[in-house]
Amino acid sequence: EVQLVEFGGGLVQPGGSLRLSCAASEFIFSNYAMSWVRQGPGKGLEWVSDISGSGGTTYYADSVKGRFTISRDNSKNTLYLQMNSLRAEDTAVYYCAKCHGDYGADYFDYWGQGTLVTVSS
Amino acid sequence: DIQMTQSPSTLSASVGDRVTITCRASQSISNWLAWYQQKPGKAPKLLIYKASSLESGVPSRFSGSASGTEFTLTISSLQPDDFATYYCQQYNSYWTFGQGTKVEIK
């Protein structure tokens, strides 16, 4: 069974940085695009960023462009999200999600359990 | 950007009821639409993809349909395990979610 486990969340001050990781297992990681999706407290789902299987193509939501960087290490089956210049509105549970395919827009067939990021002074 | 408008935001229903949730796209997305179910404190779970294809393992009481830019998720006979929040998502151009529909006990 596909497993996705996020970690790295926590409390950070406004303007600070945090790096999230997502460890993947039970599928050929490099064959699939991966995304980060977040959910603010009591709010709906918001797509944040996506990366192709090779890591060569990335996409970002306008709300995080220029502040967040998505990357992956296929040798370690791990997805990352580097978050800089954090704002209060970035407070959310961050989920990593496996895309059904390797490229282009596709639906998310598996999700991790999420990691909470709280931006507050 | 493609906007997804989901309705209603809350739906009160009883076990055994037929339930319908609607999602409208701001422009054509062909059939590139998915539906997810989310329970409190849990990750979303894929139910339907490509507007009407049932994900493996999902009960057949769930179904999806499409008409132009309007998409529908139907639960034919609501079960106790189905009380949750449901989200539509377009994946024609990047990814956009609807605002969610909470299905609660009447």
Image: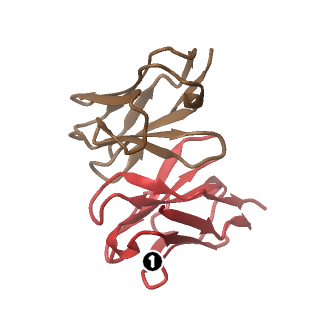
Chain colours: A red, B brown
- x, y percent for residue B102: 56, 28
- x, y percent for residue A56: 32, 77
Going by the image, does A84 lie left or right of B50? Answer: right
Quadrant in which the C terminus of chain B appears: top right
Q: Sort mark 1 into few (<14), some (14-19) or many (20+) by Cα contacts within 10 Å.
A: many
- x, y percent for residue B96: 39, 46
Mark 1 falls on what kind of element?
strand
- Judged from this view, the residue extending furthest toward the right is A121
**Which one is nearer the viewer's eye here, A101 or A85?**
A101
What residue is rendered at 65% in x and 55% in y?
A91
Kind of residue sitting beneath label 1: Arg
Q: Which residue is mark 1?
A: A72
What residue is rendered at 55% in x and 33% in y?
B85
Mark 1 belongs to which subunit? A
**Which one is nearer the viewer's eye here, A26 or A89?**
A26
**Which one is nearer the viewer's eye here, B61 or B26?**
B61
Q: Is A108 placed above or below A4 here?
A: above
- Residue B99 visible somewhere in the drawing: no
